[in-house]
Image: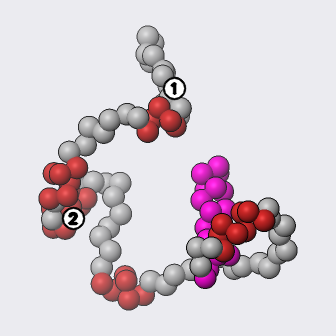
Amino acid sequence: MTKKKKGEKIVRYSSRELQQVESRTDWGKVDRLTDKQIDKGSSNDPDAAPPLTEDWFKKAAWVRPPKKEVHLRLDSDILSFFKQKGKGYQTRINQVLRAFMEAHS
């Protein structure tokens, strides 16, 4: 934990206020970076993970947490909304719940 320095002002922002802050990042410059330039920059960063190699991707596997069957009562308009988007509505409901869970963890 970083200690507050004498005379230092701590400012708090809401998530809405943070969304309105203008980025100072030159995204055009970022978009022009080549993979080689990115790898070179990250190789000098002691906190950066090593680059992912083709061998890593060959061995990698997608791991999903196991599903558990539950019976859930939803408002009819919520269920209709997800169903009208087509096949996979239960997966979409799960994704929304996961995003909520991660945002509040």
Q: Which mark is residue 12?
A: 1
Q: Secondary structure at mark 1?
A: loop
Write the residue at 44% across / 10% down: 7
- The reply, left or right, for residue 104 in relation to residue 21 is right
Question: What residue is shown at x 35% (from left), y 63% (from top)?
Answer: 49
| 1 or 2: tag closer to the N-terminus | 1
Q: Is residue 48 among the parts visible in the rendering? A: yes
Please tell me whether residue 48 belongs to the stretch shown in magenta: no
Q: Which of the 4 quarters of the picture holds residue 89? A: bottom right
Spatial CA span between label 1 and label 2: 35 Å
Q: Amino acid at mark 2?
A: Asp
Front: mark 1 or 2: 1
Range covered by the magenta-colored residues: 87-105
Label disc, if present, on residue 39 of the rendered structure: 2
- Residue type, numbered disc 1: Arg
Q: Secondary structure at mark 2?
A: helix
Q: As displayed, is residue 53 above or below residue 39? A: below
Task: Identify which residue, 35 or 85, lies in the foreground.
Answer: 85
The residue depicted at 85 percent of the width and 74 percent of the height is 71
Q: Would you say 50 lies left or right of 18 here?
A: left
Q: Position of residue 24 (x, y in %)?
A: 26, 37
Q: Quadrant of residue 55?
A: bottom left
Q: Is residue 103 magenta?
A: yes
Q: Position of residue 99 (x, y in %)?
A: 60, 59
Please rate how many residues cluster around mark 2, counting C-alpha atoms within 10 Å: few if below 14, some from 14 to 19, many from 20. Answer: some
Q: Residue furthest top?
A: 7
Query: Relative to residue 2, is residue 21 drawn left or right?
Result: left
Image location (x, y in percent) of residue 36: 15, 67
Name the chief secondary structure element in magenta.
Answer: helix
Please rate how many residues cluster around mark 1, counting C-alpha atoms within 10 Å: few if below 14, some from 14 to 19, many from 20. Answer: few
**Tag 1 and tag 2, C-beta contact below 8 Å:** no
Give coordinates of residue 51: x percent, y percent: 29, 70
